[in-house]
Amino acid sequence: MSLPNLNRLDAGMASTTRSNILGAALAIVASVGLCWLVIYEFKFVNYLRSVDGSLGVVTGHPVWKTFQDRVLAPYIVKALSFGSLEHYVAAHIFFQLVTVAIAAFLCWRLGRKYGGSDQSALFALTVFVLCFVALLLPPWLYSWDFIDMIVFAVFIDFVLSGRSLLWFVGLFAVATWNRDSADFIALWLIIDALVRYFYQCRQGLAQAALDWRRILSGIACIGVGMVIAELLRRNLLIEEMAPKLYPDNPIVAGHRYNLVLPLNIAFLEHPLLTGSPLIVIAFLTATIWLGAAFARLDPQRHLTLFLLELAMVAALFLFGRFNEPRIFLFLIPFVVTSAVMVWRGKNASAFAGT
């Protein structure tokens, strides 16, 4: 390699390092600010209810049976508390600070890597913070929600950087201990294989072939994830607390999943359409619109992400309670990435027109 090329490489590495340091510093500041906002907005008494929700998984007394297999985050918090339940609250706050900072930095990195500049990175971090704030609604914000944001920020980077199958299987292997949202990683493997095949067929490629390795890997991951979740519930669950705590709750206790579509429709049909219903509608509208615009930029590469996004929204409509906007936190990395790429595309078009 020639000296000029080495100099350019060194300059590029130095620029990336400076950007990462700046991004890490801003992510820490954002995390501290968001943690303060959560405790202020929730009030400490309500914040303790979310902490208790995480602690219940550790003790085998989750609020809902479906929470019992979400062991990764609660047990990390337990490890940070050095096994002392008295220190679990402090450990939970520290865990939130660290995980939100990591999620914020990963969004900064997505903006820098795929937007091409520190300006796009700052834009990505700003979108992350705004989305996080918009989705805050007391009293529920669980420890596994924070890890979900990290998982899907990493997942999107894997997709856009063209990582091999093993990377996705490895990410699923970690994420499945956090929450069954990991199944969407496996679902993407199936969708990606099908979309690639049909795209190649549409282009008239004679050697078009279906990637059965990805499809079978996706199916296997979903199956393994279901087995792990069931084993965790059978071996760790002592008592589901919801029947005692919320006897009038419309959700049926003891079920793996509850179909809550009618409740969500009623929530969105609130006569005033103010407050949280309006926020949920605005967030979902922005998510789908940005995802569609992102997919149009490069359908061959980005369509699978948009289709997965639609599948995630559909699943939330069916099984997630919209009166808890925190369920949408794992969509934030998708919104951030789509916003950065659409913003970059518009800037490039404006520059080309001058």
Image (cartoon, grey):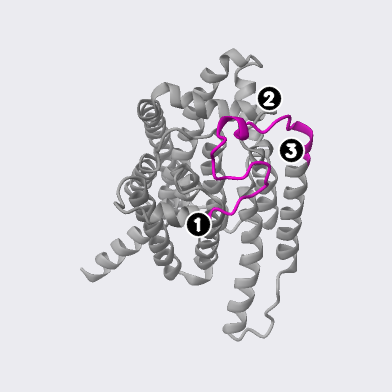
Residue 219 x/y as whole percent: 73, 60
User: Magenta stretch?
Assistant: 231-260
Residue 208 x/y as whole percent: 67, 79
- The amino acid marked with disc number 1 is Pro
- As rendered, which of 8 and 306 lies closer to the eye? 306
Residue at 60% of width from left, 49% of height from top? 181
Identify the mark at residue 297; answer none if there is no mark. Answer: none
| 39 is higher (above) or lower (below) than 140 | above
Q: Residues within 10 Å of mark 3 (few under 14, many from 20)?
A: some
> Would residue 71 be counted in the magenta stretch?
no
Residue at 42% of width from left, 68% of height from top? 297
Q: Residues within 10 Å of mark 1 (few under 14, many from 20)?
A: few
| 107 is higher (above) or lower (below) than 313 | above
| 325 is higher (above) or lower (below) than 318 | above
Q: Residues at badges 2 and 1 in contact (C-beta under 8 Å)?
A: no
**3 vs 1, front mark:** 1
- The amino acid marked with disc number 2 is Thr
Q: Secondary structure at mark 2?
A: helix
Q: Which mark is first along the chain, 1 or 3?
A: 3
Residue 238 x/y as whole percent: 73, 29
- Label 2, label 1: how many angstroms apart (C-alpha)? 33 Å
Q: Is residue 51 visible?
A: yes
Q: Which residue is mark 1?
A: 262
Q: Which residue is mark 3?
A: 233
Identify the mark at residue 59; answer none if there is no mark. Answer: 2
Q: Which mark is first along the chain, 1 or 2?
A: 2
Q: Which mark is first along the chain, 2 or 3?
A: 2
Residue at 40% of width from left, 43% of height from top? 135
Q: Residues within 10 Å of mark 2 (few under 14, many from 20)?
A: some
Residue at 49% of width from left, 29% of height from top? 96
Q: Secondary structure at mark 3?
A: helix
